[in-house]
Image (cartoon, rainbow, N blue to C red):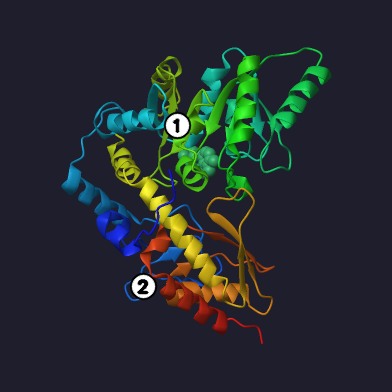
Amino acid sequence: MGKLQNIDRRDFLKKSSLCGLPFLLPVEHTNFLNNSEKIKDHQNAGDPINFVFDGPHQSPKDYIELLTSIEKEQGIEADTYLKGGATKKLEEEFAKLTGKEKAIYMPSGTMANQLAIKMLNGENPKVIVPENSHIYRDEADAAQSVHGLRLVPTGIDQAFFNLEDLQKTIRELDENEVFRSGLGTVVIENPVRRAQGVAIPLENIKEISSYCKENGFKMHLDAARMHLASAYTGVLPAEYSSHFDTVYISLYKYLNAAGGAILCGDAEIIDQMDHQIKIMGGTMYQSWSITAVAMHYLQNIENSLNAVLKTSEELIKELNELEEITICNIENGTNIFQMDLDKNIDSEKFSRILYKEHQMLIFPNKENKMRFAANASLLNREISEIKNAWKLSLKKSKIN
Ligand SMILES: Cc1ncc(COP(=O)(O)O)c(C=O)c1O
């Protein structure tokens, strides 16, 4: 997946008409604004851009319009209890994309992660997980409380763990526990959400994976943002997936669906998931409104993310020409950058003006150290227009 050369953004938007819908900016994340300042009618403020989320924010109206145009352009076939129609099509596409035998839709990434480790683990109680991962920190102790699994964290205070960290954790378990119990699965999250979206170097993944294979441990990949990692590293989803037994990819992070997840793996494991989803209460009557949208974006995801990558490179170069702004890459970073604002700028005021006057959302920070995320909403406007909006907002938010 190489970077797109010489892509014309407007042309790209025209060709992928639905990507150009002027999604609304979310008001629920703008604590730094008074209620009266939140934009309700965006008609005259230009198409919205956010430097915060995984993608453009879709209101119910946006989503309905999107579904309507997909139905008009391609037709949508309904599924029943997650079987057939748009959902089956999407599953087949993901199996191909990851090079796995099968893929299955699940209502959430949390369910995909939990069911993957449950089924991979067999009779073993222990699962080693990254200390900063979603599976360890953000899944409400589901592994412990629902599935009888013990999550053992590794890579404490690091963006990601390496083979040595894993071996040390295993050694410590062996040395410090009298009544030993089995380790079933090792989990990797890539890109790492709690470490500014860094992508783990492939060599690191390969080393861990071959060690796990040699020692009979299964491997699960939480690749909620798989396409993002691929766009920034050039490592294809199938290459990442080849080092794992199961792989989960989100349908709403970069595929803009209203929710949902896909879990991919060998038929032997995926065929058991249907029953598991049902006993967890996840067998929704219909999922086509999610899977049809994910499929729509999947068809163009490489081009879309490459356009974001190229445009954000150009935009950052331009913004760095402004005296008060320094935007830097993060080591192994993907689409998130560190942005330092000059101490002479009131960061809250800057964010407020950008939002109110230009429909651009970036979160303020008391120390003027802000997080700059590049996503498809960037493609909504010309770089010169964005730069100008920033220039005007900086001017109005000087402290003295
Ligand atoms: C890395 C990662 N894994 C898993 C999930 C869980 O996804 P879901 O919200 O679909 O349960 C998220 C959601 O934020 C995530 O960022």
In the rendered structure, which disc, 2 or 1, sits on the residue that comes first in sequence?
2
- Indicate which disc residue 46 carries: 2
Looking at the picture, does residue 233 appear above or below residue 330?
above
Looking at the picture, does residue 60 appear above or below residue 182?
below
- Report which quarter residue 165 is drawn in: top right
Q: Residue at x 31, y 43 (%)?
A: 299
Describe the element under mark 1 as helix, strand or loop. Answer: helix
Q: Residue flagged by tag 2: what amino acid is it?
A: Gly
Rendering coords of residue 46 (x, y %):
36, 72
Rendering coords of residue 70 (x, y %):
22, 47
Q: Quick one: label 2, few (<14), some, or many (20+) residues within 10 Å?
A: some
- Indicate which disc residue 124 carries: none
User: Which quadrant: the N terminus?
Assistant: top left
Tell me how far mark 2 sits from mark 1, CA to CA: 39 Å
- Report which quarter residue 397 is drawn in: bottom right
The residue beneath circle 1 is: 238
Q: Quick one: label 1, few (<14), some, or many (20+) residues within 10 Å?
A: some
Q: Residue at x 34, y 42 (%)?
A: 298
- Classify mark 2 as within 8 Å of ligand 1 or not, answering yes or no: no
Q: Residue at x 41, y 34 (%)?
A: 107
Res 27 seen here: no
User: Which quadrant: the C terminus?
Assistant: bottom right
Left or right of 71? Residue 47 is right
Q: Residue flagged by tag 1: what amino acid is it?
A: Ala
Determine contact: label 2, label 1, CB under 8 Å. Answer: no
Out of 333 and 293, give the one closest to the viewer.
333
Describe the element under mark 2 as helix, strand or loop. Answer: loop
Rendering coords of residue 398 (x, y %):
62, 83
Left or right of 119? Residue 214 is right
Out of 4 and 190, give the one closest to the viewer.
4
Residue pushed farthest front? Answer: 5
